Amino acid sequence: MPRLPILAACGLLLMLPRAHADVLLAERIKQKDGTTKPTRGTRMAEVERHFGAPQSRLDPRGGQKRQWPTIERWVYPAYTVYFERGKVIDVVLNQASPNELPPKPPIR
């Protein structure tokens, strides 16, 4: 019985990287967690009244030109709300842990 090929195959298998599971942000988005989030078009005052004060309000970005409206960001524990001209334009889930991987950037 040829032992050398079997030992060589076992040695190669030992050198392969160990598999580990990554948690993807996209997978967490698909799960129904039961939390409500602000909807697009909701005014800032309504968001604050319904969801409470944010943990932090980040510095506004943009506004250098009239075509580039100022974007304001409010950070809540589970998500960040983006406002343009006082209305919600998007809600983005925050990274839950350092092991959670965000979506890959688009290929250009």
Image (cartoon, rainbow, N blue to C red):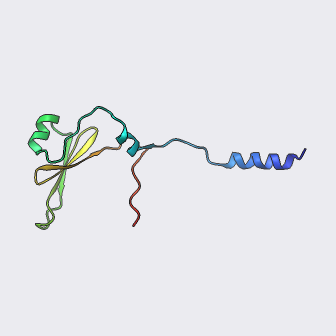
Q: How many marks?
A: 0
> Is residue 95 visible to the viewer in this orientation of the structure?
yes
> Is residue 96 visible to the viewer in this orientation of the structure?
no
Q: Residue at x 19, y 41 (%)?
A: 38
Q: Is residue 105 above or below residue 14?
A: below
**Residue lying furthest left in this view?**
45
x%, y% of residue 26?
Answer: 38, 45
Left or right of 108? Residue 22 is right
Residue 50 vs residue 57, the one in the foreground: 50
Which image quarter holds the N terminus? top right
Q: Is residue 53 above or below residue 105?
A: above
x%, y% of residue 82?
Answer: 20, 50
x%, y% of residue 34?
Answer: 29, 31
x%, y% of residue 99?
Answer: 44, 43
Residue 32 vs residue 16, the one in the foreground: 32
Q: Quadrant of residue 104?
A: bottom left
Left or right of 7? Residue 41 is left
Q: Residue at x 27, y 33 (%)?
A: 35
Which image quarter holds the C terminus? bottom left
Q: Is residue 16 above or below residue 64?
A: above
Q: Residue at x 15, y 37 (%)?
A: 53
